[in-house]
Amino acid sequence: MSDPKPISALEQRAMDSIWARGSATAEEVRRSLEPEHKLKDSTVRTILRRLEEKGYLDHETEGRVFRYRPVRARKQAAIDAVRRVIDAFCRGSAEELVAGMVENEVIEPDELRRLLDRLKEAKQSEERAQS
């Protein structure tokens, strides 16, 4: 699956609504964005169409209504977004990203220890699989 284009904050909110439900109509998405965003139906349909064009959604027709479903899981979309950040701001280096997060106290020492434990577990699993 190719890396979809980045999405706006409002598109992200629409995706959050659809991921939470599993699928949604434009009306359901519009209601989920209220009261923070008072959007016209046509605006919501445009947002959903753009998300479809960007590779995040697909739809099926239920009578006269489109029901949108995510094409990409939330976790995969998050991985794609992090990869874009790494490429854009860290010269493609995940190490540089994590080091910057540690230096700027974005990541707590306990979180870093848990990440290191997960890396060790992954390495051990990989070694067991190869033997």
Image (spheres, helix red, strand yellow):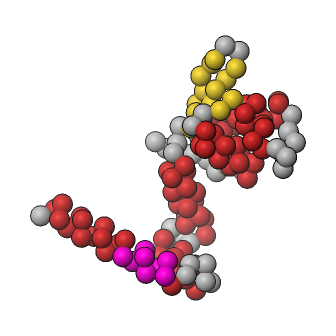
Q: Main secondary structure of the magenta part?
A: helix
In the foreground, 61 or 91: 61
Magenta range is 110-117
Quadrant where the C terminus sits is bottom left
Name the one closer to the observer, 56 or 93: 56
Residue at the image point whose x is 71% and y is 15% from the top: 64
Q: How far across and how far down the image is residue 44, in percent?
A: 78, 35
Residue 81 horizontal/vertical position (percent): 58, 57
Res. 58 visible in picture:
yes
- Residue at the image position 86 percent from the left and 34 percent from the top: 40
Q: Is residue 74 left or right of residue 66?
A: left
Q: Quadrant of residue 57?
A: top right
Q: Residue at x 51, y 84 (%)?
A: 109
In this rendering, is residue 33 above or below 23?
below
Q: Is residue 102 above or below residue 4?
A: below
In the shown orientation, is residue 120 left or right of residue 65?
left
